[in-house]
Amino acid sequence: MGRKKVVGIAGRFGARYGSTLRKRWKQIMEARYAPHTCPICGMKGYVVRVSVGLWKCKKCGAVFAGAAYVPVSGLNKAYHMKPERRR
């Protein structure tokens, strides 16, 4: 018997919708649910998506705008830099 291919999160679709679309969808969804770093407090794994483009840190409560599937887009990369702490 041959080895089974691991399809990951896209296995829910079975043989439907074509391999290219399933791979593209899998890549986007894995990026969406990956642990992200909060640009305000710097904690990793606490950022969750509230709605399309809105992200919230469960640790510090900061709500900020980002891309649809990842919290940092090309437009707001300069803004989302962790500020230096004052002494």
Image (cartoon, rainbow, N blue to C red):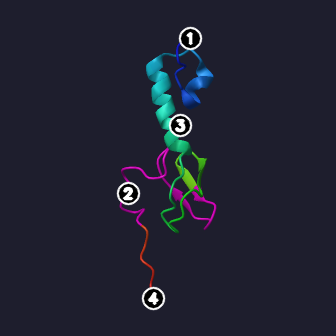
Give the crowd class for mark 4: few <14, some 14-19, many >=20 residues within 10 Å: few
Magenta region, residue range: 56-81
User: Which residue is at the front of the view, 81 or 65?
Assistant: 81
Which residue is the site of mark 4?
A: 87
State how far apart marks 4 and 3 are (Cα).
Answer: 40 Å
Nearer-N-terminus badge (2/3): 3
**Residue 39 on image: x %, y %:** 48, 63
Q: Residue at x 41, y 50 (%)?
A: 73
Residue 79 as seen in the image, left or right of residue 10: left
Callout 3, which amino acid? Met
Of badges 2 and 3, nearer the viewer stands: 3
Residue identifier under label 3: 29
Which of the image's four quarters has the C terminus?
Answer: bottom left
For this orientation, the residue located farthest to the front is: 1
Would you say residue 66 sits in the magenta stretch? yes
- Ranked by sequence position, the earlier of labels 1 and 2 is 1
Instruction: Identify the residue under disc 2.
Output: 77
| Pair 1/3: label in front | 1
Which element carries disc 4, helix, strand or loop?
loop
Q: How far apart in space, not on screen, are marks 2 and 4 (Cα)?
A: 26 Å
Q: Quadrant of the N terminus?
A: top right
Query: Do the residues under discs 4 and 3 have CB atoms within 8 angstroms?
Result: no
Q: Residue at x 47, y 18 (%)?
A: 19
- Secondary structure found at label 3: helix
Q: Quadrant of residue 12?
A: top right
> Which is in the foreground here, disc 1 or disc 2?
1
